[in-house]
Image: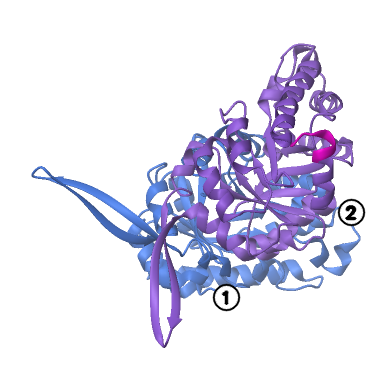
Chain colours: A blue, B purple
């Protein structure tokens, strides 16, 4: 999917909501718990109920891998069931040396038909590059995540040295920046605004203005609204740009809006509430 | 598997070799290429041929995921085929917010019977903690990796501040360290020498003495010998400790030692050559 196609969908629906299918077998509504196909039937009902209010779905691969072969099959069937109009994200947090990342890229972009995959930056450029080589596919790199552990490394201060040569005098300017800022600045050169997004957690709202300054034109995938407590209003005010530039994900707050037989209807209502709020920000 | 059991196996075999099953379907010997079960038959023959010369197997999940459902099934069958005496590593580079990492830990430690999984540190403590909660299972955290991209972030300088209060005077001492050093020092407190190892790439030999100084007692999983050019001699001299403390992985140099029908025999010879060299270092 191209940026143009994604943006067109956002403005036709007035929504930049992504629904996260972090489907936990143990949290299915009672009537689906003993059904061997319960997770797929749950996802299918959620997709049918929410597709008019969201522009994408984010499949959290961990929840499928936990169920082994059956889980992997359910993931494949779920991706295939998502309408082709919608942006399909594998939230897989992959990344390894080049020849291995190439295999992960093949897994998510060829073997399965995802539009995007989340990638961890720790191992540097050659671990990210193979994902960027696919046309009309997206790499979503971890920038500043929504969890408390973000403080351990992402929010640690790095020394940044810049060299200059003015009138024959060589000077080294030293400054400091957070690791996540260095990740954004370095990696934004590896791809373009047409194939690279960043994960910026909604719980990190105080950093959003700074992030938009550093990375003015890229799309961000924003988790952490809903169960994790981030504010949709706050991050929208700080980071919406002309062609939107945001995909805000809600998982548990939508898919587990009700634990009863009305789960799909409740999910639709929750997704619609997010979309209604987003409409106001988009038109502002 | 406990550290004691792993160490006993190392000294009974005089080997700290781990064989990496990065099995690429397109690189199978000709006679197996059209066999729908080719990858499993290849792995089975490699395991049979090398098991007396190595103490563990490292399955690179990317190569299996690239083949979709069939690949995931082959991975499960391969893990089940590895003798219970051997240390089984899922080289998966996972890591996500706590509730998601818990699902990955379930996938590799419960659904599949791996002894260890490699984990990326970027997202911090709560992304690693769920893996450490399993008894007699191991988390192998990325420290300093073997690829060129290690320079992008792992080898960037961080500012480290230490506060002290002596005779009523509060002082902040500022020093600098590489990001990977901060990762080793911070995360070594999350687990113990009995459930936490670190990935240290063999191509980073100049850092090994420093790493052993920082993390004197932990086991390291060392990739990068063989195809990537790291020196077994160099890293062994710098990082072997009393109970060994090293697992050195070779993938391509062993499993693709021959591309003909004699691939298993060639793999056995390659593994034996590593083991013979290791024996000398262990007895030194």
Q: Is A183 on the left or on the right of B233, as rendered? A: left
Determine if residue A87 is in view.
no
Foreground pick, B74 / B233: B233
Q: Position of residue B74 (x, y in %)?
A: 81, 34
| Image height of B235 relative to B115, above or below | above
Residue at 58% x, 73% y is: A273
For disc 2, the neighbor class at 10 Å (few under 14, some 14 to 19, many from 20) is few
Determine if residue A239 is in view.
yes
In which quadrant of the rendered image does the C terminus of chain B lie? top right
Residue at 77% x, 23% y is: B272
Segment colored magenta = B10-16
Q: Is A59 on the left or on the right of A165, as rendered? A: right
For disc 1, the neighbor class at 10 Å (few under 14, some 14 to 19, many from 20) is few
Q: Are marks 1 and 2 on the same chain?
A: yes
Q: Position of residue A192 (x, y in %)?
A: 40, 43
Q: Nearer the viewer, mark 1 or mark 2?
A: 1
Q: The numbered mark 2 sits on a residue in which chain?
A: A
| Image height of B51 relative to A2, above or below | above
Foreground pick, B62 / A245: B62
Q: Name which quarter of the figure residue A262 lies in.
A: bottom right
Q: The numbered mark 1 sits on a residue in which chain?
A: A
Q: Is B184 on the left or on the right of B174, as rendered? A: right
Q: Which residue is mark 1?
A: A229
Q: Residue lying furthest left in this view?
A: A167
Q: Which residue is mark 2?
A: A36
The secondary element bearing badge 2 is classed as loop
Q: Position of residue B197 (x, y in %)?
A: 68, 51
Foreground pick, A143 / A79: A143
The secondary element bearing badge 1 is classed as loop
């Amino acid at each position: 999917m191209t940026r143009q196609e994604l943006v067109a969908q956002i403005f036709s629906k007035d929504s930049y909501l992504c629904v996260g299918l972090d489907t936990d077998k143990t949290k299915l509504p009672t009537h689906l718990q003993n059904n061997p196909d319960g997770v797929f039937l749950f996802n299918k009902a959620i997709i049918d109920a929410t597709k008019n209010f969201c522009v994408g779905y984010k499949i959290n691969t961990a929840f499928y891998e936990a169920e082994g072969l059956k889980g992997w099959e359910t993931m494949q069937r779920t991706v295939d069931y998502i309408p082709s109009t919608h942006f399909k994200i594998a939230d897989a947090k992959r990344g390894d040396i080049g020849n291995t990342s190439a295999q992960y890229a093949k897994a998510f972009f060829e073997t399965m038909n995802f539009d995007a995959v989340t990638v961890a930056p720790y191992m540097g450029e050659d671990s990210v590059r193979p994902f960027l080589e696919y046309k009309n596919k997206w790499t979503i790199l971890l920038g500043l995540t929504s969890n408390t552990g973000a403080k351990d490394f992402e929010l640690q201060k790095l020394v940044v040295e810049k060299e200059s040569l003015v009138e024959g005098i060589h000077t080294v300017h030293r400054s400091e920046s957070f690791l996540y800022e260095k990740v954004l600045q370095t990696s934004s050169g590896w791809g373009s605004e047409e194939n690279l997004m960043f994960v910026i957690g909604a719980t990190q709202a105080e950093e959003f203005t700074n992030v938009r300054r550093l990375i003015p034109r890229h799309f961000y995938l924003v988790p952490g609204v809903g169960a994790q407590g981030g504010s949709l209003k706050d991050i929208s005010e700080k980071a919406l740009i002309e062609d939107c530039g945001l995909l805000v994900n809600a998982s548990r707050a939508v898919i587990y809006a009700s634990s009863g037989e009305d789960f799909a209807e409740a999910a639709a209502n929750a997704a619609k509430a997010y979309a209604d709020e987003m409409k106001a920000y988009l038109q502002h």
